[in-house]
Image (spheres, rainbow, N blue to C red):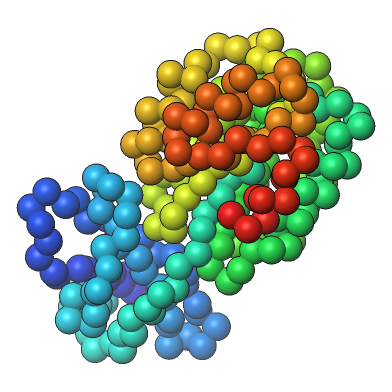
Amino acid sequence: ESDYSSILANYILDSKAIPHQSITSLDLSRYPRVCTQTSVIDKNTQKPIVDLDSSNFELLLNNKLVSAQFETVQNAVGVSVVLVVDESVDEENVKFVQNSLRRFIAGMETYDRAAIVGFSDRVNTRVVQSLTSDKNLLLGAVDSLRFGRTESNINEGAKLGVEQVVGETNPTAVIVFSSGVSNSERTTTSEVVPLANLLNTSIYSVALKASAANSLKELAEKTDGVFMSAANISQIVGL
C-alpha cells in the first residue's frame, strides 16, 4: 500500500477570506527526502496570503502528523503574463511578432511565468502553451503558432488569455497582439473586461495596424492596461 501525505494549513484568517493552497513544485530527486513548495491565496481576491511561517502548517503522512522542516520564501514573486497572438497578422508582421515574443521570453526572471494563446476565428482560438517558467517550452510555442489565417476574433482571444491567470499567485497581465479587425466576433468586450477586472488583471494591447486600434484601446483602457503601437512595443519587455 502506497503512502499518502498531505499538508494542512492551520492558521486563522479574516472570516471573509477563502484560503486556497496549491503545491507549486515537488522534488523527489532525494527520496525518501521530499522537498515541496506550496502557496496560499485568497480565492476572493486571487492574491497571496503573506507572512505565513512554519507555525501555520502541518505535514501529515497517512493522516498522522510528522515532523518537517518549513522555510518561508520571502519576496519570491514574479509576474505571470499571457501572450495572446492574432494568427491573422500580415506576413510582413509575422517575424516582428515572433521576435517580440522571443525578446519578452528572454527577459523573464526566475519567478516569472508566461503562457501563449493563439487566436483567429473561434474554432482556432486555443492555448498553445499553458503558464510556465520554462523558456524552452515557451520558445517552442512561439515557433508552433500558425500564422496565415484570414479571420480575427480579438475579444475571444483576450478572454481565453484572461482565463489562464485564474489561481495565479503572481501579479498578472495579458498582452494582446493584433493587426486585424474583429471580423469573426462572438465574444464582446463587455464579457472580457469584467473578468479581467475581477481577476485584477490588466490587458496590454499592441496594434500592428491602425484598423486594430479601437478594439485594442478599449480592452486596455477599461482594465487599467496600456495601449501600444508597433512603434513603442519595447515597453512590454519592461512590464
Q: Is residue 195 left or right of residue 20?
A: right
Q: Residue furthest right?
A: 92
Q: Is residue 151 left or right of residue 3?
A: right
Quadrant position of residue 55: bottom left
Residue 165 lies, with reference to residue 169, above or below; the image says above
Quadrant occupied by the N terminus: bottom left
Viewer-proximal residue among 206 and 48: 206
**Residue placed at 56% from the left, 39% from the top?**
226
**Residue placed at 77% from the left, 48% from the top?**
100
In this view of the protein, can residue 91 be seen by the observer?
yes
Q: Position of residue 27 (x, y in %)?
A: 50, 77
**Residue placed at 31% from the left, 89% from the top?**
69
Quadrant occupied by the C terminus: bottom right
Q: Is residue 89 left or right of residue 130?
A: right
Q: Position of residue 223 (x, y in %)?
A: 44, 34
**Residue placed at 43% from the left, 21% from the top?**
191
In this view of the protein, can residue 127 be seen by the observer?
no
Q: Position of residue 41 (x, y in %)?
A: 30, 57
Q: Position of residue 202 (x, y in %)?
A: 47, 41
Quadrant position of residue 9: bottom left
Residue 62 lies, with reference to residue 201, above or below; the image says below
Residue 196 lies, with reference to residue 191, above or below; the image says below
Q: Residue furthest front?
A: 231
Q: How many marks?
A: 0
Viewer-proximal residue among 204 and 6: 204
